[in-house]
Amino acid sequence: MPTTLAELTTLRLGGPARRLVTAATTDELVDAVRAADEAGDPLLIVGGGSNLVAGDTGWDGVVILVRTRGVQHRDAGDRSDVTVAAGEPWDALVAVTVDDGLTGLAPMSGIPGLAGATPVQNVGAYGSEVSELICGLRVLDRHSGRVEDWPPDRCRFGFRTSAFKHTDRYVVLEVTFRLERSELAQPVRYLELARRLGVEPGERAPSRAVRETVMDLRRSKGMVLDPDDHDTWSVGSFFVNPFVPAELVPDGCPNWELDGRVKLSAAWLIENAGFGKGFRLEGGRAAVSTKHTLALTNRGGATTAELLDLARVIRDGVRDRFGISLRPEAHLAGVEF
């Protein structure tokens, strides 16, 4: 029986893969991508499957499962450059750096997926982003077939985006993070996190306390994977927090100024457009999480079509109510939105 993408994604949705290749080393990953490209096969690269919405008909081509491993440290005084293979589980890496007394990653605890995916959408949480810590990447350019070493400024990092986000040209093979050697986390920027830690915004707290607090916050929102909790059968935040001109900020909507633009809370927009926690279409097996309105979930037995029907209703409802268009944060494979 062919492997289905439902078995490889946190949504537990998606049809069969015509051919599955597992890459256990970086060389195997490069060879597998080159072979698929030379053969002209449609290619889908899957890591942790935590940001992937796959079609019910599956993938009529090659699916490469990234399972590369390896973590290397290069110490220099009060810092360490940590080079990580793309297939390393992200949260396990965060935990190891905290245990090793390296600061920087703790606010991004509990995020599912693999390390190689983090630069793609410039993963971030609680006021931190990986782009602040990345000092280099190793990348396969599928157009030239060459493996290249990239400096961070080539990545064009922005809020939940990068040079990798809207193209399949590049495959991230390794990421190097420059981390400070300290028991204290970086200054806490996120008000809710600071309040939970008992510090003022801008102050520092122990990395271990930051990690534990972030994990508690994420669990309360259904954002830590749990096979017994259908609220975690999701891709996390389905929609990106939108940026709008200041005159379009709805009354009462939480907002933050960033780089001269105003970022809004997509969760607030969704809820105030009439789509509260647990909302679902009549007879639907996909629903808004009961813990967080940004997560769309599979309540068991759902299809990708049902999930996207729900997402479209929410998108259209927010646009009709506020004149603001939400776009998906997740990667869509074999489907249109």
Image (cartoon, helix red, strand yellow):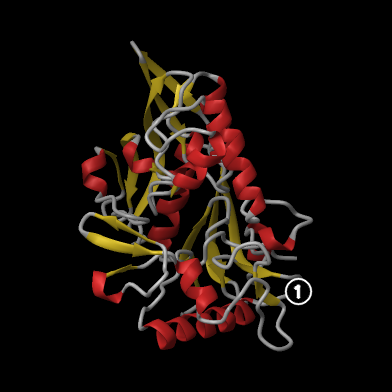
Is the residue 252 above or below the residue 108 in the image?
below
Left or right: where 286 falls relative to 80 = right
Q: How many marks overall? A: 1
Residue 43, given in percent of the width and then of the height, sits at 46, 62
Residue for badge 1 = 301
Q: Residue at x 51, y 27 (%)?
A: 207
**Which residue shows up at 54% across the image and 51% down it?**
47
Locate residue 239, reporting x and y percent.
47, 68
Toward the viewer: 233 or 36? 233
User: What residue sits 51% from the left and 83% below the top?
Assistant: 312
Location of residue 132 by image quarter: top left
Most foreground residue, 70 or 189 = 189
* x, y percent for residue 270: 51, 74
- Bin the neighbour count of mark 1 within 10 Å (Cα to Cα): few under 14, some 14-19, many 20 and up: few
Give the position of the N terminus as an image quadrant.
Answer: bottom right
- Label 1: element kind: loop
Q: Quadrant of residue 58?
A: bottom right
